[in-house]
Amino acid sequence: MLVTHRAGSLPSGADRPGPPYRVVILDFDGTLADTFPWFSRVLPGVADRYGFRRPAAHEVETLRALEARAVLRHLHVPAWKLPLIARHMRRLVARDAGDLSLFPGIPGLLARLRSGGLDLALVSSNREDVVRRVLGPECTGLIGRYACGAALFGKARRFRAVVRDIGVSPATVLCLGDELRDHHAATQAGLAFGAVTWGYTRAQALAAAGPAHLFATPEAVAAVLLPGTG
C-alpha cells in the first residue's frame, strides 16, 4: 500500500520549508513494538480467567478490521470487567517484556524524527516501565514525554494533556497509531492522525476511517514528516 495523505490534511503553514508538524505523539503497542503475537498467545488464558469468549482462529482477521468496542461486544466482554482485565494484562506484559521487540526500522525512524527537529511524545495503555524496557535506553532518550497507563478508551484526554504541556497548537501535532481507537481519540482531541499498517488493525479498515496519512513503512513516515531530507 502506498503512503497517502488527503488534500488539505496538513496543518496551516505546512507549505513552508521544514516538517509539516512540530510534535509527533506515538502509540506503543502495534506501532513501535510488535506485541500482537504476544497478545494472541496470552488472550485465550485471559478469556478463560475473566469469562469471555476465546476468538476462534478463523475470526482473528475479521476482528482486526473492527473498532475496539465492536471487538469487545463480539467477545462478550462486560464493560465492568475492563479495568480488571487491563490490570491483569499489564502484569502479564511486565512479566514477558523481555520477549518483546520493536518493529524493524523503528529505532532509525525515532532517531531521524528527533534529529529533524520534531518533538516526540508517547501515549500508551501500557506501563511506562515496560515501554522503556522494550524501547531500550537509546530510543527512550529520544522521547521527551511519556503518558502511560491510559485507559482503553482514555487516550483523548492524554493527548490533550500532552499538547497542553508542550504548549503548541493542535494543528502542529500528529498522532501516530495502528488502531481505530487511536484514530477516534486523536479526532476527539482535535489532532491529525497518521495510521500505520504494520500493527493490529488491517490496512483497509484504517484507510476507510480517513486518517490524515496512511503509512506502510517507517521509512514512509520519515519521508512525509521530514520532506526534503532524503
Image: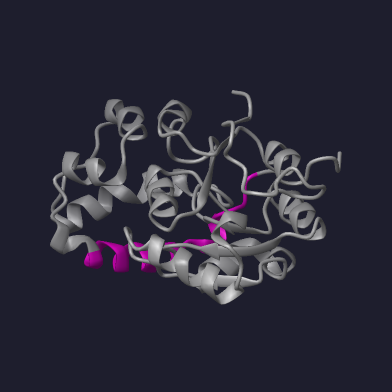
State the image quarter where residue 104 is shown. Answer: top right
As drawn, 68 above or below 59: below
As drawn, 137 above or below 64: below
Indicate the position of residue 19 as horizontal and vertical percent values: 75, 50
As drawn, 115 above or below 177: below
Looking at the image, the residue that sits furthest to the bottom is 165
> Is 102 covered by the magenta stretch?
yes
The type of colouring in the image is one colour
State the image quarter where residue 121 is shown. Answer: bottom right
Q: Nearer the viewer, residue 156 or 90?
A: 156
State the image quarter where residue 50 is shown. Answer: bottom left
> Is 104 covered by the magenta stretch?
no
Q: Nearer the viewer, residue 151 or 158?
A: 158
Instruction: Look at the image and tell me in which quarter the C terminus lies.
Output: top right
As drawn, 176 above or below 25: above
- Magenta range is 83-103
Q: Residue at x 41, y 70 (%)?
A: 149
Looking at the image, the residue that sits furthest to the front is 12
Indicate the position of residue 60 as horizontal and vertical percent values: 33, 32
Q: Residue at x 13, y 53 (%)?
A: 51
Residue 173 in view (yes/no) = no
Residue 7 in view (yes/no) = yes
Q: Main secondary structure of the magenta part?
A: helix
Indicate the position of residue 204 as horizontal and vertical percent values: 44, 26
Q: Residue at x 34, y 62 (%)?
A: 89
Instruction: Look at the image and tell me in which quarter the N terminus lies.
Output: top right
Indicate the position of residue 107 as horizontal and vertical percent values: 72, 53
Q: Residue at x 36, y 28 (%)?
A: 61
Please state the total of marks drawn on the protein image: 0
Q: Nearer the viewer, residue 71 or 176?
A: 176
